[in-house]
Image: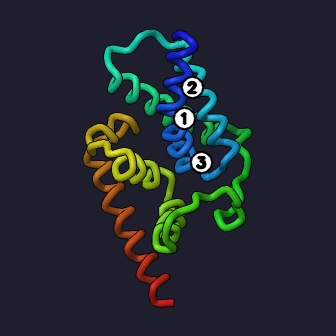
Amino acid sequence: MYRTAFEAAVERYGDTVFRLAYSYLKNRADAEDVMQETLLRLYGADEFESPEHERYWVIRVAVNECKKLLRSPWRRRTAPLEEVPETAVLDTPAQTELFHQVMALPYRYRAAVYLHYYEGYAVKEVAALMNANPSTVQTWLMRARGQLRHHLKEAESL
């Protein structure tokens, strides 16, 4: 990959890979490591059939790198979400609350929600990216929505 093409790819995929990794790992440093490793692998990759193929490949590599890091015995302990100063700055308090609740979900649910709702992938595509059955992804999304609904109603009643 030529330098200019790589720089354009970093611009295209850097934020997406970072957000996906952060949703999996809940740790800024680990998410940056995954982003760096993914983009380095992209630099050494061969040509892709299409831009969609390239995007799919990048996200699949990022998911695999997150899973690899989660299995690592050297995995750093993450701080509670309230102690992380680099959380996203969102427009409204409702969006901020929703962000906190999504980040509190188990990592499979977080990743499925992120890929489906924020990146716009269909359930079958999310399943392929996460190496799961489409029915499993639908279950994860259903459970995630249920948990979010429950937690947000609890927060409203307080």
Q: CA separation, marks 2 and 1?
A: 8 Å
Of badges 3 and 2, the one in the foreground is 2
Q: Is residue 25 left or right of residue 131?
A: right
Query: Which residue type does callout 3 highlight?
Result: Leu
Element under disc 1:
helix
The residue mark sitting in front, 2 or 1, is 1
**Callouts 3 and 2 close, C-beta under 8 Å:** no
> Is the C-beta separation of discs 2 and 1 under 8 Å?
yes
Q: Judge whether residue 67 can be spotted in this image.
A: no
Assign a secondary structure to mark 2: helix
* 10 Å crowding of disc 3: few (<14), some (14-19), many (20+): many
Which of the numbered marks, if any, corresponds to residue 33? none
Give the residue at mark 1: 14
In-front residue for pair 26/90: 90
Mark 2 neighbour density, 10 Å: few (under 14) some (14–19) many (20 or more): many
Q: Quadrant of residue 128?
A: top left
**Mark 1 or 3, closer to the camera:** 1
What residue is shown at x 71% (from left), y 59% (from top)? 79
Instruction: Say few, some or many: other residues with alpha carbon within 10 Å of mark 1 (under 14 / 14 to 19 / 20 or more).
Output: some
Instruction: Give the SS element for disc 3.
Output: helix
Upstream in the sequence, badge 2 or badge 1? Answer: 1
Side of 107 where 149 appears, left or right? left
Q: Position of residue 3 (x, y in %)?
A: 57, 13
Counting residues from the N terminus, which is met first, the one under dot 3 or under dot 2? 3
Mark 3, residue position: 25
- Choose between 111 and 72: the one closer to the eye: 111
* Residue 29 in view in this figure: yes
Q: Position of residue 135 (x, y in %)?
A: 25, 48
What number is the disc on residue 39? Answer: 2
